[in-house]
Image (cartoon, rainbow, N blue to C red):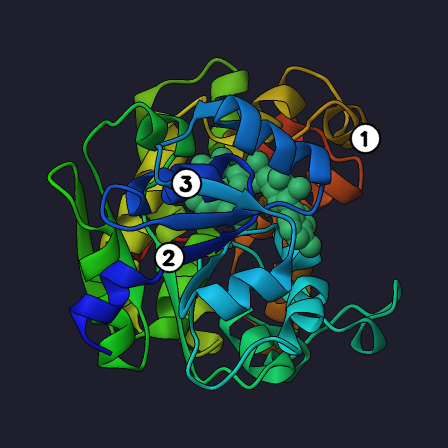
Amino acid sequence: MDSKMLSEKPVGVVGAGSFGTAIANILAEKSKVLLYARNESVVDHIEKKGISSGQLLHENVSGSNELEEIASKCDIIFPIVPSSNFRSLIKDFSEYLHPYHILIHGTKGLDVSIQDETQESTKLNRNQVRTMSEIIQDESLVVRVGCLAGPNLARELADKQPAATVVASHFDEVIQAGIRLLRNDRFQVYGSQDLIGVELCGVLKNIIAIASGALSGMGYGENARALLISRGMVEMIYLGRALGGNTEAFIGLAGVGDLVATCSSTLSRNFTVGYRLAQGENLQQITDSMDETAEGINTIRIAKKLTNFYKVRAPILEMLHKVLFENLTVEEALQYLMKYPLNVDIDFL
Ligand SMILES: NC(=O)C1=CN([C@@H]2O[C@H](COP(=O)(O)OP(=O)(O)OC[C@H]3O[C@@H](n4cnc5c(N)ncnc54)[C@H](O)[C@@H]3O)[C@@H](O)[C@H]2O)C=CC1
Ligand SMILES: O=C(CO)COP(=O)(O)O
């Protein structure tokens, strides 16, 4: 595909939430963009008011309510919806998708097929858990898939602050397309061939972000956060490698970069969940009053079952699971972690 064709055809973004909208605006600096929303009133708002998810839209962005229109007009499409809706979206989309399409998703979550998981199951293996790029391949004829992941808090992107992301794919043309479409003088784009590793970075850092919010909610400062980030990174690497990622991805922008951003910002929804837990709210109260997606909650549930299967040492994850789903208090979890008998700093290199 040459650059002339790219500039002639619009780029598709599916999902008009905080991140989909921020990415649509970045893409719009170089291309026409078709932004898909399920809800007709949201499309109406996009068309008439030029606003989506509270963000003023670039003039190159128009709205669409038709997946068929997105697939027929766009060769390159960015699906950015929560992981809980990702498979059903791709199923609906698949009849319009062809092998010439390129899909680069921005979703930081995992999927478990219903038939593979029951409430009682305590273990999951890798074959029972899908990343979003795997869902695209499972459910459609699209071959050239990729993801974008990195420290990309939507609000900061919307405010045009400097930032960078990683586009990962097994196909160089997907990486090159991502760089060509997204890169501008405030937004750097790096490439990686480790698609699974980069996807897992974005997914697993949300677990640690919840823990970081909890530390802040208890009033603790930067020593505690640094301890959490570095030990959290080790857990991410253990589990990420068990699931097929390489260590390199985790020490890059999508790994430690996104981990630091999300663990340090009150803009992060996952951080906010942890903060509110530490302030005494329960999970139900928090999720009932949040409009946006905090992927880390479901990821903790899935990751715990994966660590049970692979016997991965992940004490932070274990404690968070108990806090979220088994009524352990945040203070009790912290006490347990501070007594955890470990003294080797780095044993994964
Ligand atoms: N907000 C952020 O700063 C960032 C978010 N992400 C990831 O992006 C994904 C989406 O997050 P946000 O945009 O923040 O979520 P959000 O909660 O702001 O919005 C999600 C949007 O997806 C739409 N949606 C859900 N199912 C859909 C479907 N089947 N078809 C079309 N639209 C559908 C919803 O209507 C909503 O507009 C998540 O996996 C998140 O982890 C990644 C990087 C940054
Ligand atoms: O992934 C993010 C920033 O890179 C956004 O994190 P939250 O989903 O926690 O808001």
Indicate which disc residue 10 carries. 2
Residue picked out by circle 3: 61
Please name whichever residue, 26 or 123, is drawn nearer the observer in this view of the structure.
26
Kind of residue at badge 2 = Pro
In this rendering, position of residue 35 left or right of residue 259: right
Above or below 51: residue 80: below
Q: Quadrant of the C terminus?
A: bottom left
Indicate which disc residue 284 carries. 1
Kind of residue at badge 1 = Gln
Give the mark nearer the N terminus: 1 vs 2. 2
Location of residue 342 in the rendering, given as x and y in whole percent from the top left corner: 41, 53
- The quarter holding residue 193 reads bottom left
Label 3 crowd bin: few (<14), some (14–19), many (20+), radius 10 Å: many
- The quarter holding residue 67 reads bottom right
Numbered disc 3: secondary structure: strand
Q: Quadrant of the N terminus?
A: bottom left
